[in-house]
Image: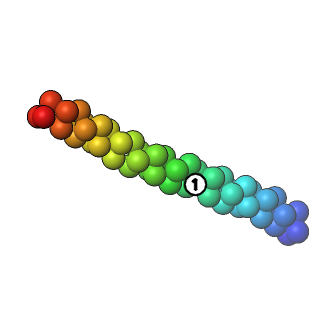
């Protein structure tokens, strides 16, 4: 019984750490995406304001 218990725990720990790494990547990607959209909108508004004057 102990022979089956240890590999199962190791596999479970590897899967959980992998999921947390992927979750961190997606969170960072979401933040970068939001910042990129804000920068692009600000740039468009700045260029539009230059043409209006």
- Percent position (x, y) of residue 40? 32, 38
26 or 16: which is nearer to us? 26
- Percent position (x, y) of residue 4? 82, 63
- The residue at the point 56 percent across, 49 percent down is 25
Q: Residue furthest top?
A: 51
- The residue at the point 44 percent across, 50 percent down is 30
The N terminus lies in which quarter of the figure? bottom right
- Percent position (x, y) of residue 21? 63, 53
50 or 21: which is nearer to us? 50
Residue to which mark 1 is pinned? 24
Q: Quadrant of residue 9?
A: bottom right
Q: Residue furthest left?
A: 52
Is residue 29 found left or right of 21 in the rendered image? left
- The residue at the point 25 percent across, 38 percent down is 46
Can see residue 23? Answer: yes
Q: Residue furthest bottom?
A: 1
């Amino acid at each position: 019984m102990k022979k089956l218990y240890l590999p199962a725990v190791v596999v479970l720990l590897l899967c959980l750490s992998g999921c947390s790494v992927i979750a961190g990547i997606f969170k960072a990607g979401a933040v970068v995406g939001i910042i990129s959209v804000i920068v692009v909108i600000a740039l468009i508004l700045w260029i539009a304001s230059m043409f209006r004057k």
